[in-house]
Every structure is written in C-alpha cells, then in structure tokens.
C-alpha cells in the first residue's frame, strides 16, 4: 500500500506494524493542527486493507502489535473496525494487540457492548488527544469534547478492558494560563490513571486557524519559557495510582528539549532537568514556536531553520 501523507503515531508504537485504514482525520477541526489539512479524508476500502495484510504475511511478516492509522482510526464504525480486526486475526493469529488513536467523541459514540466487543477482538491501547484540562480552552480550540466527557470516555474504555495514553500540549491555554492548565490537567490525570502521558508542546503553525487568532490578538501564545514552567508545575502534581508508575514523555521540539521518566520515582531528576532548561531561557528574549511547512519537514519562521534534523529529531516520521 502506498502511504498517503506523513506518518504520525505515538513514539510507543515505533516498533508496531502500521496499517492504514483511513487517509487523513475524520474530525480535522482542531484549530492548532496541521497534520492532515492537506488531505481529503476517506476510509480505505477493506479490500485494500486486506491486500496490505496479505502482502506483509507473504513477505514473512509476523507482527505482534499493529497500529491502525491515520488520524482517528477509532472513529470508524464499530462494525467496520470489527471486520478489520477479524482480518488481522486471520492473517496474523499471533498478533497480541491492535492499537490506535482515538478522540473522546469516537469513544462515546460506541455502546458499552461495542467497546467490549472491540476489546475481545484485540483492541488494547488507545491514544487520546486530551490536550488541555480547561473547558474554555477545549471549546476555543474546537476540540470535540469537554472534560466531563473525557472522564466518561476513559471510564467506559477502562470498563471494557482497554488502557489509554493521554496526549497533552503545554502552551495550548495561551499566555499567562500555563499553571492553571497544568493544575487542571494534573487533576484529570490523577483521576484517570493513563499508562503514559505524552506532552507535545505546542507549535504555532502559520497555516492553521489558530494563527489568525494570534494575528488579531484574540489568542496570545505562551512562549517557550512559560511552557517549561507549565510542564514543571504539571510534573510536581502528577501522582501514580497504586504501584503502577506513570511514564511521562515531554517533547519541546522547537527548542530541542525533552524530559522523560517514570513518576513518581524519577520526579526529582526530571524537575532538575527542567530547572536547568528554565535557567537557560529566563533571561533571554521570549522564544515563540512559530513554524511553517509540513511535518516532518517543518521550518521555523525565524530564518527558515528546520525544526528537526537527523541528529535532533524527537518525534517525526524519521524517528519512528
């Protein structure tokens, strides 16, 4: 199968076989996102999906984990997903888990019976774009949920036996609201116990609707220093439920900074690393993550320097 668009998946899935079941994103309205705006959304016919499974099997592929792409594979109807899962089991009976991205709404649109069925068929791990802990921010960014719905979606997939990772974004709440957002996110994360928290600190892309809000001053972006302070406050507050630690991974690709570890055991080391990064930026002119172009070939608007190169790429198709 010829892959359309750029590869986008969580770093935890870099060893999984990526099986496209859609092109683009079925939602596609988040104001900050440019990942799929150049693609016309469509579902990939089941015949093409099966042909790809057959191709991999005939090449002696034996994947134990499969990641369904692209932007929101869990948004497919339950019956359609069931057919994909049955084909996967037919071609790869040794497959232990089928994972994919999900939105809160794509979860809530499925009945408890459908969620349980999908789990029985092999769905194990969902990656959910929570982004912010503040309802007004979610509404402004045109996310497809509020926080009460996020709590409900996590409760229901947990009842079905699935686990989830929470994807968040420092900087999404805008200037002056980093600490407020960190505290709201920590309350959600401590209540829902994700297996993994991934922070993709926010880019401000020139070609998405949010950029117009920056130009007309209806949205004031946070600079990278505030984003680091926000992340530090979040790491101070995240707790682990029981004996299961929380794996945290924070990407600040614009300034090429990353902090990663298990909470609470690595909290001290992670906070020390953030303290040093904060020290480097607190006496400099503000740095804003303005970018243009398509991932993974994003460029900084200041001087057209590439965001990633082969030595510093944290999260892009090259690093996967």
Image: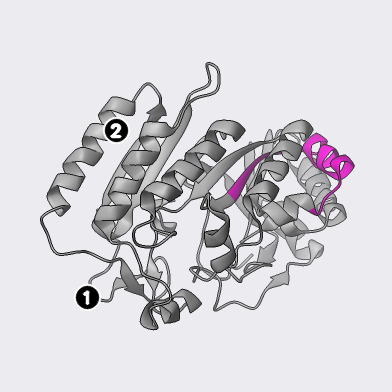
Q: Residue at x 78, y 41 (%)?
A: 89
Q: Residue at x 39, y 40 (%)?
A: 234
Task: Provide the residue designation for mark 1.
Answer: 302
Is 124 included in the stretch rendered in magenta?
Answer: yes
State the image quarter where residue 77 is shown. bottom right
Percent x, y for residue 284? 12, 59
Is 196 included in the stretch rendered in magenta?
Answer: no
Q: Earlier in the sequence, mark 1 or mark 2?
A: 2
Q: Which of 203 and 188 is in front in this view?
A: 188
Image position of 303 with respect to 172: above or below:
below
Q: Which mark is residue 270?
A: 2
User: In the drawing, does residue 168 fall left or right of residue 223?
Assistant: right
Q: Nearer the viewer, residue 89 or 146?
A: 146
Image position of 215 with respect to 6: above or below:
below
Highlighted magenta segment, given as a residue range = 109-128
User: Total number of numbered labels?
Assistant: 2
Q: Residue 233 carries which label?
A: none
């Amino acid at each position: 199968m010829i892959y359309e668009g750029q590869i986008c998946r969580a770093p935890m899935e870099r060893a999984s076989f990526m099986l496209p079941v859609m092109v683009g994103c079925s939602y596609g309205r988040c104001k900050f996102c440019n990942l799929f705006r150049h693609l016309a959304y469509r579902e990939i016919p089941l015949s093409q999906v099966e042909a790809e499974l057959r191709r991999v099997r005939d090449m002696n592929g034996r994947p134990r984990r499969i990641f369904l792409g692209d932007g929101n594979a869990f948004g497919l109807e339950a019956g359609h997903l069931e057919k994909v899962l049955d084909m996967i089991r037919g071609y790869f009976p040794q497959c232990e888990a089928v994972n994919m991205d999900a939105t809160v709404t794509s979860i809530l649109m499925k009945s408890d019976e459908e969620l349980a069925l999908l789990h029985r068929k092999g769905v194990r791990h969902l990656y959910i774009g929570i982004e912010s802990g503040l309802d007004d921010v979610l509404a402004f960014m045109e996310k497809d949920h509020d926080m009460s719905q996020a709590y409900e979606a996590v409760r229901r997939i947990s009842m079905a036996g699935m686990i989830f990772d929470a994807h968040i974004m420092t900087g999404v709440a805008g200037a002056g609201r980093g600490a407020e957002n960190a505290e709201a996110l920590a309350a959600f994360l401590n209540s829902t116990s994700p297996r993994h928290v991934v922070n993709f600190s926010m880019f401000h892309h020139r070609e998405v609707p949010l950029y117009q809000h920056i130009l007309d001053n209806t949205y004031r972006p946070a600079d990278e220093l505030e984003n680091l302070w926000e992340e530090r406050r979040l790491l101070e507050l995240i707790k682990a439920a029981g004996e299961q630690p929380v794996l945290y991974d924070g990407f600040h690709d614009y300034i090429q900074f990353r902090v990663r570890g298990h909470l609470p055991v690595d909290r001290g080391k992670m906070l020390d690393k953030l303290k040093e990064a904060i020290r480097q930026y607190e006496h400099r002119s503000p740095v804003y993550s303005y970018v243009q172009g398509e991932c993974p070939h994003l460029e900084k608007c200041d001087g057209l320097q590439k965001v990633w190169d082969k030595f510093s790429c944290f999260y892009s198709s090259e690093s996967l």
